[in-house]
Structure formats: structure tokens, C-alpha cells
Amino acid sequence: MTDDGDRPTPGKGLINGLAVTLKTMTRRTTTQQYPDVQPELPPRSRGVIALSEENCTVCMLCARECPDWCIYIDSHKEEVVVPGAARARQRNVLDRFDIDYALCMYCGICVEVCPFDALHWSPEFEYAETDVLSLLHDKDRLGEWMRTVPPPPAHDVLGEPSKEEATAARKAAGPGAATAAKTARPAPVRPGPPRPSDAVPPREQPPERPESAR
């Protein structure tokens, strides 16, 4: 035996679908007219990664931490003569810095681990190619994206200065200058409850005279 109460109402699904359609037709459309009208992207959008070549020290942190292994770096060492030094110093010179955006998953790990702010996020996203091999961007093309990187947000006026700012201010003030720790006033000490040893002894009352002496 079958229960007639379990059977669906004929045409119920069609009615629900038409209800959703009519409800959507009464709403205002939110279609963006791209590419005629550029979209308003949030300030922290992840578009393309830009390279500031002068900040790169070839530490290889970005290439080692990249989970997709899409960063390729080559460099060589050259000697730098420092006046007054006993011997010449060596520094790394960047020869190749490529990012394969066909493999990049935009995790942002390379931007986070860079200790010298050589990599920056750019909101630019219009770099599609017809050939997948053209998605390999070299250091020259990555450097061109720096013009699209937005400026960093302003520091909070009420926040603490960064370590770099505090070090620069201390060096500019010179040795022996008063620091924030030296000029800070000591916190006021609130008086606590008196201790038994500090309590004032009660005043002694004179002994009463007998009635015969009055």
C-alpha cells in the first residue's frame, strides 16, 4: 500500500521556479559594464605581483617558500670596493627573476616572506594572454607593474611607532638623548590599607577614681 500523502503536488516545482524568476525580475540589475566601465576593486586586491628590483637581495626566500615553484631566480656575485675597508666586499646581483603566472595560485606567500619589500601586490588583473608561454613574466615586466601598486596606508597616529622609525629617531637624537623610557613618569602609587604595625595605638583613658575619694 502507498500513502497518498507522500506524493508531491503536481506542478509544485514549476511554481517554485517561476516564483524565483518573478522575484529576480523585480530587483535592480547589478551587471557591471566591463570593459567599458572599470570595476572598483578593494584596496587589497590580488592582481599581479610587482617587483622592486633595487630592494631584492637574492635571498631566495620567495623561491623556496613558493608552494608551486613558479619563481625562477639567477644571480652572480661581484666585488664592491669600499673606501677604507681592508678588502673588497661581495654583493649579489640579480640576473633573472621570473614568475610563471600559469602556475601561480596567488597565495601571497612570496610577498609575505620577503624581508626587504621587493614584492608587492598590484590590483592590475588585465594581463591575459593567448599563449600560455607568455604568462612567464621576467624582471623587466614585473618592474613595470610597480607603477600600478597603490601607496601603503597611513600609520595610525595613536599607534606605536615601528621598530625602524624608533631606531631612526634614536640615531637622529644622538647619544644620551632622553628616550620614551627615561622621560616616562612613574605611575602613582595608591595608598593601601594600613598595616597592623603602622596603626596608631589608641589613646589611653585615665583610671577612674573611687567614690570615697570624690
Image: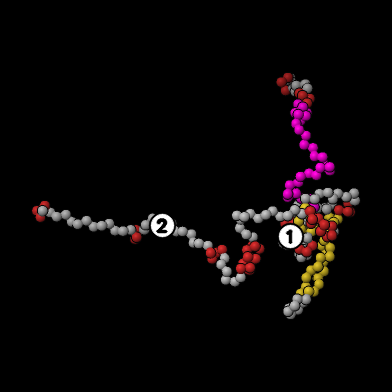
Would residue 30 be visible to someone looking at this image?
yes
In the rendered image, the quadrant that contains the N terminus is top right
Q: Amino acid at mark 2?
A: Pro
Question: Residue 191 — which label?
Answer: 2
Describe residue 199's horizontal placement relative to residue 164 as left or right: left
Q: Hey, which quadrant is residue 94 in on the image? A: bottom right
Report, in whole angstroms, how far the alpha carbon at label 2 lies from the one at label 1: 51 Å
**Marks 2 and 1, the one that precedes in the sequence:** 1
Q: Main secondary structure of the magenta part?
A: loop
Q: Nearer the viewer, residue 200 or 158?
A: 158
Q: Residue at x 72, y 61 (%)?
A: 115
Q: Position of residue 15 (x, y in %)?
A: 77, 24
Q: Is residue 198 above or below residue 34?
A: below
Q: Label 2 neighbourhood size at 10 Å, few (<14), some (14-19), many (20+)?
A: few
Q: Position of residue 73 (x, y in %)?
A: 82, 62
Coloring scheme of the render?
A: secondary structure
Q: Residue at x 33, y 58 (%)?
A: 199
The residue singled out by tag 1 in the image is 117
Region in magenta: 19-48
Q: Is residue 56 above or below residue 148?
A: below
Q: Position of residue 182 (x, y in %)?
A: 54, 66
